[in-house]
C-alpha cells in the first residue's frame, strides 16, 4: 500500500497521569481524520522501569526509562 506524500503518520500522548511514583499515558496515531490507540505506557518513576502494552498483543514489553532533562 502506497500512501500519498501528503499523508504522514502523526502521534500524540493522551491523558498523561503523573503521580509521585507512577506515570501513565496512552499513545495514539493518525493518518488523516481519525485517531487510533497504539499503546498504553506505565512507568514507575522511582525505579525507572516501564511497561508498554500494545493494543493488538497480550502482555507488555519492559522498558528502561530515565529522565533526560526538565522540559518545563
Image: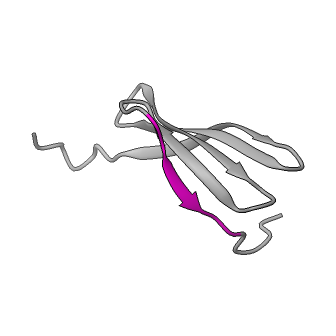
Say which quadrant the C terminus sits in. Answer: bottom right
Quarter of the image with the N terminus is: top left
Residue visible at 27% across and 46% down in the picture: 6
Q: Is residue 9 left or right of residue 47?
A: left
Q: Residue furthest top?
A: 34
Counting from the top left corner in percent of width and height, residue 43 is at: 68, 50
Q: Is residue 5 left or right of residue 44?
A: left
Which residue lies at the image location 37% right of the left edge and 33% below the top edge?
Answer: 57
Please tell me which residue lies in front, 10 or 70: 70
Magenta stretch encompasses residue 12: no
- Give the x, y percent position of residue 33: 40, 26
The answer to which image quadrant residue 13 occupies is top right
The residue lying furthest to the left in this view is 1
- Residue 17 vs residue 44, the one in the foreground: 44
Residue 65 within the magenta-colored segment of the rendering: yes
Please name the colour scheme applied to the rendered image: one colour
As drawn, 33 above or below 65? above
Identify the residue shown where x is 53% and y is 45%.
52
Image label count: 0
x and y percentages locating residue 64 in the rendered image: 59, 64
Q: Residue furthest right?
A: 20
Seen from the viewer's position, the closer of residues 13 and 21 is 21
The segment highlighted magenta reads 59-66
Residue at 55%, 58% in the rendered image: 63
Left or right: residue 31 versus residue 66 is left
Amino acid at each position: 500500500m502506497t500512501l500519498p506524500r501528503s499523508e504522514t503518520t502523526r502521534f500524540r500522548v493522551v491523558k498523561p497521569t503523573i503521580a509521585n511514583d507512577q506515570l501513565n499515558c496512552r499513545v495514539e496515531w493518525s493518518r488523516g481524520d481519525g485517531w487510533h490507540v497504539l499503546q498504553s505506557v506505565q512507568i514507575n518513576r522511582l525505579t525507572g522501569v516501564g511497561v508498554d502494552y500494545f493494543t493488538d498483543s497480550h502482555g507488555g514489553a519492559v522498558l528502561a526509562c530515565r529522565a533526560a532533562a526538565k522540559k518545563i
